[in-house]
Amino acid sequence: MVSLMNEDEGQQNDDCVVRLNGVVIGYDSNDPLVGVPDLTIRSGEIVAITGASGVGKTTLLRTIAGLVRPISGTLQVCGATLPASPLRGTVGYIPQRLGLVRHASVRHNVMLGARAGHTQSLTILPSSDVTQHAMDSIKRMGLSDKSNEPIRRLSGGQQRRVATARTLAQAPKLIMADEFLSELDDETLSKVLSEVIDYVRTSGAALIVVEHDVSRAKSMADRLLVIDDGQVNPFLSEPTALEVKS
Ligand SMILES: Nc1ncnc2c1ncn2[C@@H]1O[C@H](COP(=O)(O)OP(=O)(O)O)[C@@H](O)[C@H]1O
Ligand SMILES: [Mg+2]
């Protein structure tokens, strides 16, 4: 991946860099979950985080999203220094638990994302453009015929697509997606994935996905990380049968 950014320049123009140095993550300082000595993720990169259930994948994403305070250390996320200063700019988070407004329509939910994105933007767009942006995202996720349906009447997979549309409508510079492909059938999965990757590649945003399925993670990511034994490490390879035996 070509980066236009000089190693030491850090944040520049619209790029989003995520940098964790000596960060300890978790909810209890007596029982930390993950140590991150040094991790940098740049605009244009797709990074997948994998690891066993309960190791802290969701907590790491929530920490980068500014929703969980690190036990110690600071994070640079798209120009903000967490936890001291709040996140500026457009960071899109597709949580494992989707956080949709269940009684409201698909369109209403996606409009929330579009409005959130455009209030961050320096140019105030006419509301018709914001609506158009929302409708385009709904179309990208193949939900045009569901746009007036309330969320509670949709399947789990359709709800995941709404959450993805909501995030794309936000036009984020960083997308974090937590197991966002679960509950999707194979055909829908490849469509959702290709739309998100297309957004990332054309906009130059960074994408961090948590994905427990290693082969799926490998197929989408430029870089694969694994949380194991309380550390974030590059994913090298699965142990061979021989290594397991010895
Ligand atoms: N809000 C919370 N407060 C305290 N502990 C939590 C909270 N959320 C998750 N945990 C615990 O932190 C650990 C890691 O959780 P999580 O990050 O969700 O793991 P993963 O996404 O890798 O399955 C688990 O033991 C979980 O029970
Ligand atoms: Mg999780």
Image (spheres, rainbow, N blue to C red):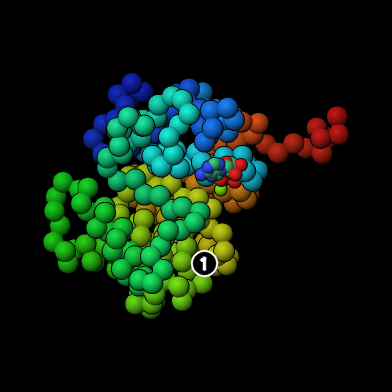
Quadrant position of the C terminus in the picture = top right
Above or below for 71 versus 171: above
Nearer the observer, 151 or 10: 151
Q: Residue 217 vs residue 192: left or right?
A: right
The image quadrant of residue 68 is top left
Residue 150, percent from left and from top? 39, 75
Farthest residue, direction right: 245
Q: Can residue 38 be seen in this view?
A: no
Query: What residue lies at 51% left-to-right and 23% top-to-bottom?
Result: 37
The location of residue 95, given as percent across then percent down, is: 46, 52
Observer-nearest residue: 181 or 108?
A: 108
Given residues 121 and 100, the one toward you in this image is 100
Res 245 → quadrant: top right
Reading the image, the residue beneath label 1 is 157
Quadrant in which residue 75 is drawn? top left
Give residue 183's position: percent from left, percent from top: 57, 64
Q: At 26% from the left edge and 52% from the top edge, which residue is drawn?
A: 117
Callout 1: SS? helix
Q: In this view, does 232 lie above or below 143?
A: above
Q: Where is residue 172 in the image (x, y as percent from the top left)?
A: 32, 48
Q: Can residue 160 be seen in this view?
A: yes
> Which class describes the residues within 10 Å of circle 1: few (<14), some (14-19), or many (20+)?
some
